[in-house]
Every structure is written in structure tokens, then in C-alpha cells.
Image (cartoon, rainbow, N blue to C red):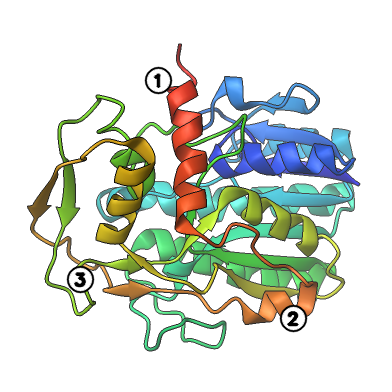
């Protein structure tokens, strides 16, 4: 297939492009490099530098490439930032996304796989979270993603689109070539690994009195290569759908720290901080639907394998993509 990939120079996008090219697909990456990295652009992919908010640029890029499908990773994704600068999230995630959809209408492409998030659920009413759980986002980031999911339904009805919205849980890990390197890093594992890399003296744990076995938050970590394989599987879907993407297993912050200590051989001292407002004690996915519908399953089910892959990449790239 000819696949147009927004955000293909970012963390998840770069690993998807790598896996898609291995599978024989032809790829065009569209990225403004505000969060992505030039060094993460696959050498066999076509690359267009552009901003989703610039409609003529995105239209020209999509029409020129004439894709069979679009994978939409690009967007703003920092919860804290969305609470202080919500306009950025509605501009990029909603207006920018709608520009992409209009460019698809212009080109005649009607298949899209959308990078959504479990943040659309907000504070979950039950664990594990399945696709029937009410979507009640508690921040502009999650709300902007939910709005775009709703917009996709209208493009299905009006323009005959087929879409798959993949609601990620905690993306983690790395391929041998591509890993996490962001302007502002908020994810647990890459921040944790800064201690054995000598970039931080201690690791901050936000709260240890949650209603969990060890008092720290529990999250569902899914390997970035498993995320990529889910997107490839979603391209075969002939009807629109929404799927949660996780392993169905939850690991606490302290459990992940202990795994990282064993893998790195570093004591990784921790400092207990006040809990962050709005952090649910548990976020664990039910991925039953995507397993049944698409035959997808995660290959990295041990958190130790996820941490090991991240550690291998960060050891080789201690400064990320900046050498």
C-alpha cells in the first residue's frame, strides 16, 4: 500500500514507518519536526516538511502522494500543557486533523487509522477499561482526541470514510533503531533511565498512598513495536472501529523501578513527591476486541522486555538524536 504518515518522524511514528517498510509498504512522512526528529526519518521514506495547520501544504502533500491509506500520529500530547494552553490542542488536534481529512477528500483517499488515547475515558468507572466505557475526558488533550474521533464518524457518514481509532495506553520501549526523544519527556521509563545514564541523581515518584498493593499508580505498558503492528493490522479493517491498545496487564511505578534496577545494575534512588492531581490509581486496558477482530496480540508482554529494549536504545543514544 501507499501510506501517508503524519508525525512519522516522532517516537511511535518512526517505529511504525520502520515496520511498514519492512512489510513492503511505500511511505510518505509528513511532519513539522516540532516534536519529531530529522534523524528519525526512515531513509527509504519520502519526507514532506509541513504543518497540519497550513491547509495548502497538507493538501498538496496528500494529493501528490495519492495514498491508499493515512496513518495519523501527528498532534499535541502533553496533558499538563493542555491545561495551560488548551488552544494549542484544539488548533492542532482538531483543526489540523480536519485539514488532513479535507486533503484526503480532495485526493480520494478514504481510509484512515487514527492515533487516539485512553485519555478520552478520563477517570475510568471500571478496570480493565473496554471500549464500552463512557468517554469523559478530564483535560483538553483527551477532549481534543475525542472530538476528532467524533469528527471521523461524520466523515464516514458524509464522505464514505473507513476509520480505525486506536486508543493507546502507555507506549514504551524502542526498536533497535528508533526510540523516545522528546522536547519535554513525561513518560515513566525514559525519565527513569535518566538516572543510570547520569542525567538525574534521583527519580521522582508522584504519590505512594494510592489504593494499589504498593501505593503507587498502576499502568498498562505496551511496546512501541506492538503498537506499530496494531496499526498495520488496522489497515486491513473494512469497517470503521474503535480499539483499545494495551496488554491487559498492569505494573506499578515501584515494580517498573525495580525492573530497571535489575536491568541497568544501578540502584536508582527515588524521592517520593506529592501526588499529581488527576492521576487515576489504575489504568489497564481490555484489548479483547482488537484481538478478536484483527487477530492482533502483543509480543512484548513482560515489562522487563520493554524496559530492556528502551535501555538498549538509550545506552546507544544517551543524548537521543542529538550527538
- Residues at marks 3 and 2, CA–CA distance in whole angstroms: 33 Å
Q: Nearer the viewer, residue 266 or 202?
A: 266
Sort mark 2 into few (<14), some (14-19) or many (20+) by Cα contacts within 10 Å.
few
Residue at (45% x, 16% y) in the render: 322
Sort mark 3 into few (<14), some (14-19) or many (20+) by Cα contacts within 10 Å.
some
Residues tagged 3 and 2 counted as in contact (Cβ below 8 A): no
Left or right: 198 as drawn, with respect to 145: left
For residue 14, above or below residue 280: above
Q: Which residue is mark 2?
A: 292
Q: Position of residue 188 (x, y in %)?
A: 33, 49
Residues tagged 2 and 1 counted as in contact (Cβ below 8 A): no
Secondary structure beneath dot 1 equals loop
Dividing the picture into quarters, in which one does residue 206 lie? bottom left
Secondary structure beneath dot 2 equals helix
Residue at (72% x, 55% y) in the render: 229
Task: Specify which label sits upstream in the sequence, 3 or 2.
Answer: 3
Q: Which residue is mark 3?
A: 214
Left or right: 181 as drawn, with respect to 158: left
Residue at (57% x, 40% y) in the render: 53
Q: Which residue is mark 1?
A: 319
Amino acid at each position: 500500500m501507499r501510506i501517508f504518515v503524519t508525525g512519522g518522524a516522532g517516537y511511535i511514528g518512526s517505529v511504525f514507518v520502520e515496520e511498514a517498510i519492512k512489510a513492503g509498504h511505500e511511505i510518505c512522512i509528513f511532519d513539522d519536526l516540532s516534536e519529531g526528529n530529522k534523524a528519525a526519518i526512515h531513509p527509504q521514506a519520502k519526507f514532506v516538511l509541513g504543518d497540519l495547520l497550513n491547509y495548502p501544504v497538507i493538501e498538496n502533500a496528500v494529493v501528490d502522494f495519492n495514498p491508499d491509506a493515512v496513518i495519523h500520529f501527528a498532534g499535541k500530547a502533553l496533558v499538563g500543557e493542555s491545561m495551560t494552553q488548551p488552544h494549542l490542542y484544539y488548533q492542532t488536534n482538531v483543526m489540523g486533523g480536519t485539514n488532513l481529512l479535507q486533503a484526503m477528500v480532495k485526493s480520494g483517499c478514504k481510509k484512515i487509522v487514527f492515533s487516539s488515547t485512553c485519555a478520552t475515558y478520563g477517570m475510568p468507572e471500571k478496570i480493565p477499561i473496554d471500549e464500552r466505557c463512557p468517554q469523559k475526558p478530564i483535560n483538553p488533550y483527551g477532549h481534543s482526541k475525542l472530538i476528532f474521533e467524533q469528527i471521523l464518524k461524520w466523515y464516514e457518514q458524509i464522505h464514505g470514510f473507513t476509520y480505525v481509532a486506536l486508543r493507546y495506553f502507555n507506549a514504551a520501549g524502542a526498536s533497535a533503531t528508533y526510540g523516545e526523544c522528546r522536547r519535554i519527556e513525561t513518560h515513566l521509563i525514559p525519565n527513569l533511565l535518566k538516572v543510570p545514564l547520569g542525567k538525574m541523581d534521583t527519580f521522582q515518584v508522584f504519590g505512594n498512598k494510592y489504593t494499589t498493593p504498593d501505593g503507587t499508580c498502576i499502568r498498562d505498558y505496551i511496546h512501541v513495536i506492538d503498537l506499530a503492528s496494531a496499526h498495520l493490522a488496522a489497515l486491513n479493517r473494512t469497517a470503521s472501529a474503535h480499539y483499545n491498545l494495551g496488554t491487559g496487564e498492569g505494573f506499578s511505578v515501584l515494580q517498573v523501578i525495580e525492573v530497571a534496577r535489575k536491568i541497568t545494575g544501578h540502584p536508582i534512588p527515588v524521592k517520593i513527591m506529592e501526588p499529581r492531581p488527576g492521576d487515576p490509581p489504575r489504568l489497564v486496558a481490555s484489548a479483547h476486541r482488537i484481538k478478536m477482530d484483527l487477530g492482533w496480540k502483543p509480543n512484548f508482554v513482560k515489562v522487563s522486555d520493554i524496559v530492556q529494549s528502551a535501555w538498549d536504545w538509550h545506552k546507544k543514544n544517551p543524548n537521543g538524536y542529538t550527538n
